[in-house]
Image (cartoon, coloured by chain):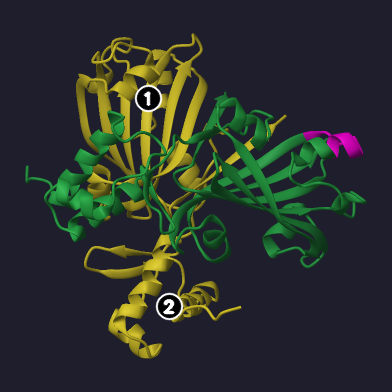
Chain colours: A yellow, B green
């Protein structure tokens, strides 16, 4: 078998440093010049190894602050009826939500189809950025049937939406339909999460129905690729 | 708002060509020199636009054959008890399976944990490459408790495994536990799927239990990022 190219050998040595805890989760890597010296290599080759580790989700860049070891992925189980705050906290991590925008506007084609309404019908659109341990990991776009939920726009969107729907409208979540696919983060999403356009991500869309079978909410979640792991249990 | 950089404008124009069907799914793009001429740009800028479209999963490269529009993603619903052949065919696509390796060997740490056996215990390991419409999209690594399934190694692994377990051993699949996360395809996986190391992918692991609660099979599926979309239905 031919020997691996040097940048992949270098990648393996960096993985060892991460796995043995010499570089613990969330720690900052030494500067690139120092690392290149330590491994007796060029900045170009070192960069190749770091980029490889980045695409594997083991390290990530922060604007002007260098490279960091990526924290463990948070697990999300769509089978469980847990809010973002609940499942992040349950894993010993710190959740935070920032409401970026709340406004009534025509639904996009995808949102209209998901909600079963006419394309262009006005819905309540909410944009939120969510953090785990201070790191922005998720941009969430929500479209809500506020024609069925009068006064919804006036409330607080920094906490669980379905808890509000239960408390304020007596609505019970009955069924969720999820789609998941790897994608690149571009434009708005990339900017909101502080990554370059084209960075790997995971898109999770979700339509939520109440007990009367009405699709009340459509959600598009854009996750940093290295922050999330989904767990699905299926009984046959 | 500042104008988008030129490569992103170029990306938008290429997306229009794809969406209007001027460049239909699975078609080959004109050569890079021709494209650069058509859009009056340099090869470098054109490459930036193409790479962006590649990371979004809209186009992909084939070794020495240039750029192709990516076919529609195939949908996989873990809730449904369908084999790869079944769900790919049901979507009007052509599935194919190539068995790359079948051998008894010690389980990896992940496989042993998933199967609830001692690390290093010998299992039957099967490696398969799966195709949709002739494109290699999935590398599958399977670990099987063949100590509980005598004679398993001698059969055919190019078809549905659980159909064999049912027909030959009377076993019924009862529960599946899946984990999904975006990852980079590296080493073996990248090579088997004909992409460069570091290319975006999706890893889906699956533990399958029979009716007696025994974990008989552990699976690691490595998908090309642009080939797959998962659909999960959850009733609360």
Q: Residue at x 33, y 74 (%)?
A: A47
Where B64 sits versus B167, above or below?
A: below
Question: Which residue is the site of mark 1?
Answer: A218
SS at mark 1 in the image: strand
Q: What chain is tagged by disc 1? A: A
**Total tally of numbered discs in the picture:** 2
B7 horizontally vs A37: left or right: left
Q: What quarter of the picture does the C terminus of chain A occupy?
A: top right
- Is B156 covered by the magenta stretch? no
Where B226 sits versus A15, above or below?
A: above
Q: Magenta residues, as a range?
A: B165-173
Q: Is residue A114 visible?
A: yes
Q: Position of residue B203 (x, y in %)?
A: 55, 51
Q: Position of residue A123 (x, y in %)?
A: 26, 18
Question: Which residue is the site of mark 2?
Answer: A7
Mark sitting earlier along the chain (1/2): 2
Q: What quarter of the picture does the N terminus of chain A occupy?
A: bottom right
Q: Position of residue A54 (x, y in %)?
A: 39, 64
B209 horizontally vs B12: left or right: right
Same chain shared by disc 1 and disc 2 = yes
A212 horizontally vs A38: left or right: right
Q: Nearer the viewer, residue A76 or B14?
A: B14
Q: Is residue A157 visible?
A: no
Q: Residue at x 69, y 39 (%)?
A: B176
SS at mark 2 in the image: helix
């Amino acid at each position: 078998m031919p020997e691996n190219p040097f940048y992949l050998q270098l990648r393996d040595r960096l993985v060892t440093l991460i796995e043995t805890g010499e570089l613990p989760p969330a720690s900052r890597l030494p500067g690139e010049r120092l690392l290149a010296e330590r491994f007796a290599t060029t900045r170009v080759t070192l960069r190749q190894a770091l980029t490889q580790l980045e695409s594997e989700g083991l390290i990530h860049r922060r604007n002007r602050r260098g490279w960091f070891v990526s924290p463990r992925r948070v697990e999300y189980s769509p089978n469980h009826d847990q809010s973002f705050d609940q499942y992040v906290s349950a894993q010993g991590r710190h959740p935070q939500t920032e409401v970026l925008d709340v406004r009534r506007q025509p639904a996009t084609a995808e949102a209209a189809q998901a909600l079963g309404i006419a394309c262009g019908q006005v819905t309540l659109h909410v944009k939120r950025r969510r953090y785990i341990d201070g790191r922005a990991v998720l941009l969430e776009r929500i479209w809500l049937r506020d024609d069925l939920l009068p006064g919804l726009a006036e409330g607080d969107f920094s906490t669980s939406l379905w808890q509000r729907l239960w408390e304020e409208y007596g609505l019970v979540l009955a069924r969720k339909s999820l789609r998941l696919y790897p994608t690149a983060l571009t434009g708005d999403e990339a900017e909101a999460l502080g990554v370059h356009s084209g960075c790997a991500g995971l898109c999770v869309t979700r339509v939520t129905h109440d007990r009367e079978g009405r699709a009340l909410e459509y959600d598009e979640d854009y996750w940093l690729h290295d922050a999330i792991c989904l767990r699905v249990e299926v009984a046959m």
